[in-house]
Image (cartoon, grey):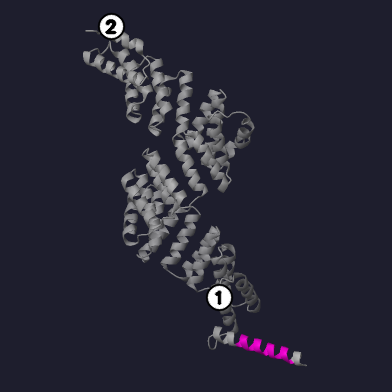
């Protein structure tokens, strides 16, 4: 009997506790559902997510027509980044309360986050019909159109939103990004210069830096990218943009330092290692590029990266066992939807054909790659080599020049271009290229020897005591370094011009 009474008393105490909790959670006169929702919110604040979810789903069964329950479930899944579920519950809440702006916004942005772009367009379109001339709703509608790649329409909506509310910086910012996309750089600069003054956010400085880079205003692009990093040291795209700015100016060491700083800040990702690989590819350091591309695959499996790895291996002379892989990755190249991937596939085919001696096919592959994108510096050099082998002097010179324009520190291209002129006994042009090479690679014995040799060959055309003295002085310098290769020519000079 005593145990029985004890259990009764415990049950009464439990009921009393629940009633006390209800009183605390339920405002005077509120429905019981409010107290239960508030209890779920308390669970969330205590990071008891499983208990909160279970309780909210239970409340939904008890109160199937309660907008607040659905709205809270939407918040719950939104905070968990499960945007599809969030959108589902925000939609149910909106169906019960179709004149609440917050629900239109929450639903539309949840749909955008879940990549349900056309559904987001419909949501914001409905919102526009309910809330006439509301800048936030119009901005959301523009974002949905942006995602659907209806850029002109999106820009018109953003302009309209900013006209209604001049404090709507999101609309102004998004308008600027579309201006850049359409090449309207001056208008974009007007908008971005205002944004960085009145709303100095990392994203605004970053976009402005991108614009300055596009306009080849590298000093300002660099300054803006650095400001972005100062505002947010974990903003990886800013580090990569700064690396691109340095790379565009052929400051390779600085570009690599930017990538290294991002890695030191533990911002490791496929994008980071891809950026590093691209810098090495730009310099034709295929061994280092190969290592970085392999790191990319640790974060993201991608066909294009697989092809780039193969390109590096083939260019490094690793041909054995590669033919099957080349065929497997390029057999459907013509039907490839992604243009950048198609360009890489043609480059892979070109590299394979070049290295296996099929120069005609290689030339066709490389030209197809360049029709898609001009950002393939290695292709220019290989085309120059192909045209040199074919005896097409005009194209040989054209593509060597393009190689050095795209990659001014391409040591082998300088050597091969100079050897091409020497082969054709065009000593004047060879000497001109040697002098350019020595500005980039000073004190290089290979180029200094050829500077002596071409000077010797041209001496009869432009003979003077000064020229002879300069050549002999250069020969003595190289002899001291034990790198002189033209002793016979020096002796002829001494004999011919002695005294």
Horizontal relation, residue 250 to residue 141: left or right: left
Residue drawn at (37%, 66%) of the image: 164
Of label 1 and label 2, which has the lower sequence position?
Answer: 1
Q: Which residue lies most toward the right here? A: 1
Closer to the camera, 318 or 374?
Answer: 318
Question: Across the whole image, how many numbered discs are drawn on residues?
Answer: 2
Q: CA distance from mark 1 to mark 2?
A: 99 Å
**Residue 275, relative to residue 319: is it above or below?**
below
Q: What residue is pinned by disc 1?
A: 41
Q: What residue is pinned by disc 2?
A: 495
Q: Which structural element holds mark 1?
A: helix
Q: Which structural element holds mark 2?
A: helix
Quadrant of residue 357 in the image?
Answer: top right
Quadrant of residue 67 in the image?
Answer: bottom right
Residue drawn at (50%, 45%) of the image: 273
Residue 373 percent coordinates (x, y): 47, 37
Magenta residues, as a range? 5-19
Closer to the camera, 54 or 287?
Answer: 287
Q: Residues within 10 Å of mark 1 (few under 14, many from 20)?
A: many
Q: Is 244 one of the magenta-colored residues?
A: no
**Residue 180, relative to residue 31: is it above or below?**
above
């Amino acid at each position: 009997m005593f145990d029985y009474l004890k259990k009764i008393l415990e049950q009464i105490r439990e009921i009393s506790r629940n009633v006390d909790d209800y009183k605390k959670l339920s405002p005077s006169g509120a429905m019981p559902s409010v107290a239960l929702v508030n209890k779920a919110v308390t669970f969330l604040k205590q990071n008891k997510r499983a208990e909160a979810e279970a309780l909210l789903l239970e409340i939904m069964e008890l109160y199937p027509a309660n907008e607040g329950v659905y709205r809270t479930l939407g918040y719950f899944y939104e905070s968990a980044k499960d945007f599809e579920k969030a959108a589902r519950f925000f939609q149910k809440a909106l169906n019960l309360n179709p004149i609440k702006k917050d629900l239109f916004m929450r639903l539309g942005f949840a749909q955008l986050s879940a990549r349900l772009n056309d559904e987001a367009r419909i949501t914001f379109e409905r919102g526009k019909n309910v809330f006439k001339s509301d800048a936030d709703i119009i901005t959301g509608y523009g974002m949905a159109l942006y995602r659907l790649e209806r850029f002109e329409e999106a820009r018109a909506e953003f302009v309209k939103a900013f006209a209604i509310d001049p404090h709507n910086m999101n609309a102004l910012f998004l308008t600027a990004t579309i201006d850049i996309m359409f090449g309207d750089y001056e208008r974009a600069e007007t908008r971005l210069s205002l944004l960085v003054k009145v709303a100095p956010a990392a994203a605004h400085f970053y976009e402005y830096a991108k614009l300055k880079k596009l306009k080849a205003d590298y000093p300002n692009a660099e300054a803006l990218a650095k400001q972005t990093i100062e505002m947010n040291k974990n903003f990886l795209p800013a580090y990569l943009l700064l690396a691109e700015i340095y790379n565009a100016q052929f400051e390779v060491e600085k570009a690599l330092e930017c990538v290294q700083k991002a890695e030191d800040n533990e911002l490791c990702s496929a994008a980071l290692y891809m950026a590093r690989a691209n810098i090495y590819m730009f310099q034709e350091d295929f061994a280092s590029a190969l290592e970085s591309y392999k790191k990319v695959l640790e974060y993201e499996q991608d066909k294009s990266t697989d092809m780039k790895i193969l390109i590096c291996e083939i260019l490094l002379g690793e041909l054995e066992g590669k033919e099957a892989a080349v065929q497997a990755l390029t057999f459907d190249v013509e039907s490839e939807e992604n243009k950048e991937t198609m360009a890489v596939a043609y480059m892979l085919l070109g590299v394979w054909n070049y290295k296996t001696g099929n120069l005609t096919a290689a030339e066709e592959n490389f030209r197809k790659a360049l029709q898609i994108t001009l950002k393939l510096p290695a292709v220019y050099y290989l085309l120059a080599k192909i045209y040199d082998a074919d005896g097409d002097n005009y194209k040989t010179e054209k593509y060597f020049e393009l190689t050095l324009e795209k990659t001014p520190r391409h040591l082998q291209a300088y050597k091969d271009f100079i050897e091409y002129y020497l082969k054709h006994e065009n000593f004047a042009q060879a000497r001109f290229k040697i002098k350019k090479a020595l500005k980039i690679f000073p004190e290089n014995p290979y180029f200094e020897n050829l500077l002596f040799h071409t000077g010797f060959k041209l001496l009869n055309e432009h003979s003077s005591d000064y020229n002879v003295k300069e050549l002999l002085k250069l020969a003595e310098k190289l002899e001291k370094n034990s790198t002189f290769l033209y002793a016979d020519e020096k002796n002829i000079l001494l004999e011919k011009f002695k005294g």
